[in-house]
Image (cartoon, grey):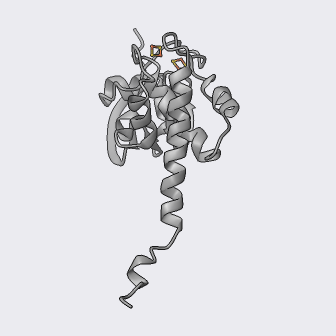
Amino acid sequence: MVLEDSRAVRVVVNGEVREADAPVRMLLSDFLRHRLGLTGTHVGCEQGVCGSCTIHLNGDPHRSCLLLAVQAHGEEITTIEGMREHPVALSFARCHAIQCGFCTAGLVMSATAFLREEPAPSRQAIVGAVSSNLCRCTGYQNIVRAVAEAAAEMGAQADERASPDTSAAVGPG
Ligand code: FES
Ligand code: FES
């Protein structure tokens, strides 16, 4: 019997350095779930189609079922566990854009990357963006609404940061 070769894989996940051994053919999605215990990343098709396994690798969205764990060695990853307070994740919860929740992590990761590229998208652009992730439950109405609301909220936050606070400069009389 030939034992599969393993490598130590070290990554920064959600801001934390993590390291574990992985067989050289282990998928990144399986590494995150089974070696690092980050089970929020879901695995549906394992063929790059459904988008459930989407994570950010060095800031860009990737299907983690299409990458090997060893390819991520030394890189920076964000998973849904690192998105708890993110406006997109909160908007999904607020808008009830979730039924069984299987697709949700991938959708949040994809939508976040989309809004970074296109901060003020049209409804049509949002529909196009979320179509890259399969949801079998929701009919997408609330998902589209959640992304639109997150875009509006993040836009308002950006405006607030950009406009200087003049109140301190206004003195009495
Ligand atoms: S599990 Fe990766 S795209 Fe479906
Ligand atoms: S909420 Fe069930 S697959 Fe999307």
Left or right of 68 on screen, residue 38: left
Choose top left, top right, bottom left or bottom right for residue 121: top right
**Percent coordinates x, y for residue 106 in the rendering:** 49, 27
Q: Residue at coordinates 54% horizontally, 34% vertically from top-left?
A: 147
Instruction: Using the image as rendered, state which of residue 68 and residue 165 is in the foreground.
Output: 165
Note whether residue 48 is visible: yes
Q: Residue at coordinates 56% horizontally, 24% vertically from top-left?
A: 66
Note whether residue 28 is visible: no
**Percent coordinates x, y for residue 118 in the rendering:** 65, 44
Q: Say which quadrant the N terminus sits in.
A: top left
Q: Say which quadrant the C terminus sits in.
A: bottom left
**Percent coordinates x, y for residue 52 in the rendering:** 49, 21
Q: Residue at coordinates 51% horizontally, 27% vertically from top-left?
A: 107
Q: Residue furthest left?
A: 37
Left or right of 17 on screen, residue 48: right
Choose top left, top right, bottom left or bottom right for residue 79: top left
Left or right of 58 on screen, residue 102: left
Q: Residue furthest front?
A: 173
**Percent coordinates x, y for residue 74 in the rendering:** 45, 46
Instruction: Using the image as rendered, state which of residue 130 and residue 1 is in the foreground.
Output: 130
Instruction: Using the image as rendered, state which of residue 122 and residue 29 is in the foreground.
Output: 122
